[in-house]
Image (tube, rainbow, N blue to C red):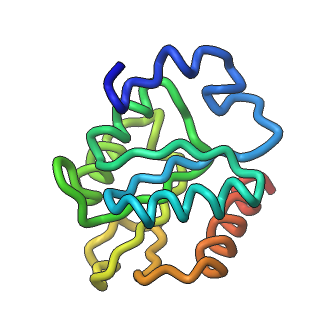
Amino acid sequence: MTPFSISSELQRPEDRGEGLKHKSILVVEDDHDTRVALREVLENEDYIVVTATNGRMALEILKNFRPSLILLDIMMPIMDGFDFLAWVGKNASLRSIPVVTVSAHVLAAKLPEGVVFIKKPLEIDTVLKTVSGLLSYRTA
């Protein structure tokens, strides 16, 4: 199995993010340490977390998984966050998923309207408050 082919792993509706008691998050981050840290912190808050190392891998995952939120690095190899956001914005079934972007560079002016930006280095409290706030707003 390729590292981003999860179709065989996500066959049940609850595995695809449907009808979940807990919210699901797709973390798209090329830096291994950051990706692992985000996964651990979010899982400790009872989020279901799926990870990808670049935008292309994330698009493959989205074929079989609809997260409640996407946490997206901007500067990545293969497909960066800007290209990923452009593709998601053109896809009617994906554009309603809230996206939080993260980057060490101040790029907020270049982001599509409605996309939240958090500057790296990440502060865990800021990430958790942002994620929680967006997911609470979305379900309210």
From the top left corner, tell me how far across and down residue 53 is, in percent.
34, 49
Image: 125 above or below 59: below
In the image: residue 49, left or right of residue 86: right
Residue nearest the observer in this picture, 93 or 72: 72
In the image: residue 13, left or right of residue 56: right
From the top left corner, tell me how far across and down residue 105 is, in percent.
28, 82
Image: 49 above or below 105: above
Residue found at x 45% / y 59%: 35
Q: Quadrant of the N terminus?
A: top left
Image: 34 above or below 121: above
Q: Quadrant of the C terminus?
A: bottom right
From the top left corner, tell me how far across and down residue 133 is, in percent.
70, 69
Residue found at x 57% / y 56%: 39
From the top left corner, tell me how far across and down residue 61 is, in percent.
42, 32
Query: Given the current orientation, which residue lies at the most extreme left position?
Result: 78
Residue found at x 82% / y 39%: 21
Count of marks overlaid on the render: 0
Quarter occupied by residue 10: top right
In the image: residue 51, left or right of residue 44: left
In the image: residue 30, left or right of residue 77: right
Image: 120 above or below 85: below
